[in-house]
């Protein structure tokens, strides 16, 4: 089966600019996660969707980050405006149901200069 | 938030078994233990998961203590390609959250 697709693979922007990441989960997977992984740290959960509804966004910096999942399929994560500390890999994952494994994409590496 | 504690790093000789411990003393009855690994510049890769019984698949074995407060991931014959960061995660079957901790960096030595 096709895996979780993310784009772009790499992105370099200047601070205060905006950026968006796209994720296409595995077909039929109801749960979708976005993670931020700073170099040397474990992935940090930013937001979790169940179909097109938000389940958990407690760690999402809502003043600058936003995410949506249209029609319960693809998802976009946006940062506006970006800060230097947003430099990280942004990972998307999807899951068919509880008690099954989550599948991760390759991530988008963001560098803010 | 992460509910697991793992040693930051471990070494293992190639061909030997790698035993990676994880402490999850606050685990509740409906929470599963998952193991993932991450090789540099790649997304995390699923290895195995379990509730209370020991589990085995083609990649590894998972041993969960009877009180479920800790577990061990066993890679039976470590190879150089097993060098990675290994994450132990507990996830409930209600909230479905998936929180990572800091993981164990395993280095397999030739």
Image (tube, grey):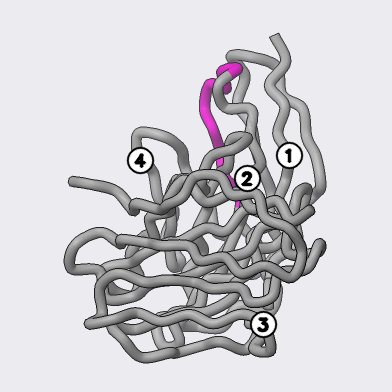
Q: Name the residue beneath numbered marker 4.
A: B57
Q: Are marks 3 and 1 in contact (CB under 8 Å)?
A: no
Q: Kindly report the distance in space between the C-alpha atoms of the residues bearing marks 4 and 2.
A: 16 Å
Looking at the image, tell me whether mark 4 or mark 2 is earlier in sequence order: 4
Q: Which mark is residue B105?
A: 1
Helix, strand or loop status at disc 3: loop
- Residue indicated by mark 3: A64
> Is label 3 in contact with label 4 (beta carbons under 8 Å)?
no
Q: Label 3 crowding class (10 Å Cα cut-off): few <14, some 14-19, many 20+?
A: few
Is A29 situated left or right of A78 in this image? left
Identified at 66% across, 41% down, the residue is B85
Cα–Cα gap, marks 3 and 1: 32 Å
Question: Is A87 rendered above or below residue B1?
Answer: above
In x, y percent, where is residue B33? 51, 64
Residue A73, horizontal then vertical, whole percent: 25, 73
Q: Separation of disc 3 and disc 4 at Cα? A: 42 Å
Q: Position of residue B18 (x, y in %)?
A: 63, 31
What is the C-alpha distance between the residues marked 1 and 2? 6 Å
Q: Are marks 1 and 2 in contact (CB under 8 Å)?
A: yes
Q: Which residue is mark 2?
A: B86
Q: Earlier in the sequence, mark 4 or mark 1?
A: 4
């Amino acid at each position: 089966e096709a895996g979780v697709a993310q784009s772009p693979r790499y992105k370099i922007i200047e601070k205060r600019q905006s950026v968006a990441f796209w994720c296409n989960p595995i077909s039929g997977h109801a749960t979708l996660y976005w993670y931020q992984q700073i170099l040397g740290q474990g992935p940090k959960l930013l937001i979790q969707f169940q179909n097109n509804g938000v389940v958990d966004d407690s760690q999402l910096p809502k003043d600058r980050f936003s995410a949506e999942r249209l029609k319960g399929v693809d998802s976009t994560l946006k940062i506006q405006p970006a800060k230097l500390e947003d430099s990280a890999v942004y990972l998307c994952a999807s899951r068919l149901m509880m008690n099954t494994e989550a599948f991760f994409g390759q991530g988008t590496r963001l560098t803010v200069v | 938030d992460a509910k697991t504690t793992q040693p930051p790093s471990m070494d293992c000789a190639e061909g030997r078994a790698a035993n990676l411990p994880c402490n999850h003393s606050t685990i509740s009855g409906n929470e599963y233990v998952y193991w993932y690994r991450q090789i540099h510049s790649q997304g995390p890769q699923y290895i195995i998961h379990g509730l209370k019984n020991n589990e085995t698949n083609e990649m590894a074995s998972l041993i969960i203590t009877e009180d479920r407060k800790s577990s061990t991931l066993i890679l039976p014959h470590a190879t150089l390609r097993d060098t990675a960061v290994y994450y132990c995660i507990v996830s409930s079957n209600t909230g479905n959250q998936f929180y990572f901790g800091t993981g164990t960096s395993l280095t397999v030595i030739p």
